[in-house]
Image: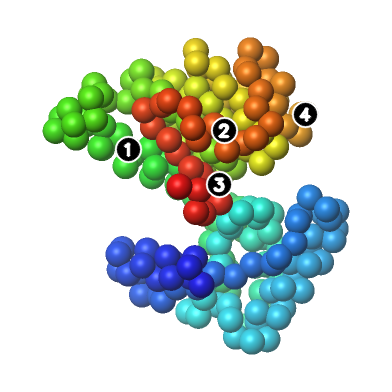
Amino acid sequence: MALAALMTYKCAIVNVPFGGGKGGLKINPRKYSVYELEKITRRYTAELVKKNFIGPGTDVPAPDYGTGEREMAWIVDTYQSLRPGEIDAAGCVTGKPVTQGGVRGRREATGLGIFFGIREVCSMPDVMERLGLPLGIEGKRVIVQGLGNVGYHAAKYFQQAGAKIIALAEYEGAIRNDAGLDVDAVFEHRKTSGSILNFSGAENFSKNTDALEYDCDILIPAALENVI
């Protein structure tokens, strides 16, 4: 209910003519094969269609925790097969692969929005003076919780702007290096090892929430809700 309410507010603020809704499946995707996840996602979509809970003018799902372009591709494919005569059926979800009608830049958009918002705040002399921080992003110490779609891209843009990513946290734990972590290198390390832990030159913490307590200039909670 809380997430659905937040979607209502977000749509209203930017004048999107929708209400708000949120839906999902209470499963741990790590415990299922890709084949099983596809069957589950397609069945979920079929049930949404049956109940008229999905459609370009009804409700448009989007990727969130545990989902991405792959799942959105399964949803749009299922929807189109069940509604073959609907001319705008591809608009039943956002976050699709570009090859299936998705929008370029959508994957990076949320993380880039976080960067733009914080960059704007960091350019305000009165705000930075009250915080006792110098103007600009360069040199700022940043901690990011979550290395998914949002956290990864936000961390990458901050690093490119000259900030130091001093800690990263994921569900398996947290890593820290006050000299700065290479975001892309950590991302590749996690892809190959399955964990951000044991990254070269970083200190390990088995409790991922420990990263939220470190001294920093910018904290980005890009994982689940109710962190702060």
Q: Is residue 214 left or right of residue 11?
A: right
Q: Which mark is residue 223?
A: 3
Which amino acid type corresponds to the residue marked 3 in the rendered image? Ala
In the figure, 190 relative to 15: above or below?
Answer: above
- Determine whether label 3 and label 2 are within 8 Å by CB: no
Q: Residue at x 23, y 25 (%)?
A: 132
Q: Position of residue 179 (x, y in %)?
A: 49, 13
Of circles 3 and 4, which is in front?
Answer: 3
Q: Which mark is residue 118?
A: 1
Q: Position of residue 13 (x, y in %)?
A: 30, 64
Q: Is residue 188 left or right of residue 33?
A: left
Tell me the SS state at disc 1.
helix
Of circles 3 and 2, which is in front?
Answer: 2
Q: Residues within 10 Å of mark 1 (few under 14, many from 20)?
A: some
Q: Residue at x 62, y 30 (%)?
A: 174
Q: How many numbered circles are shown?
A: 4
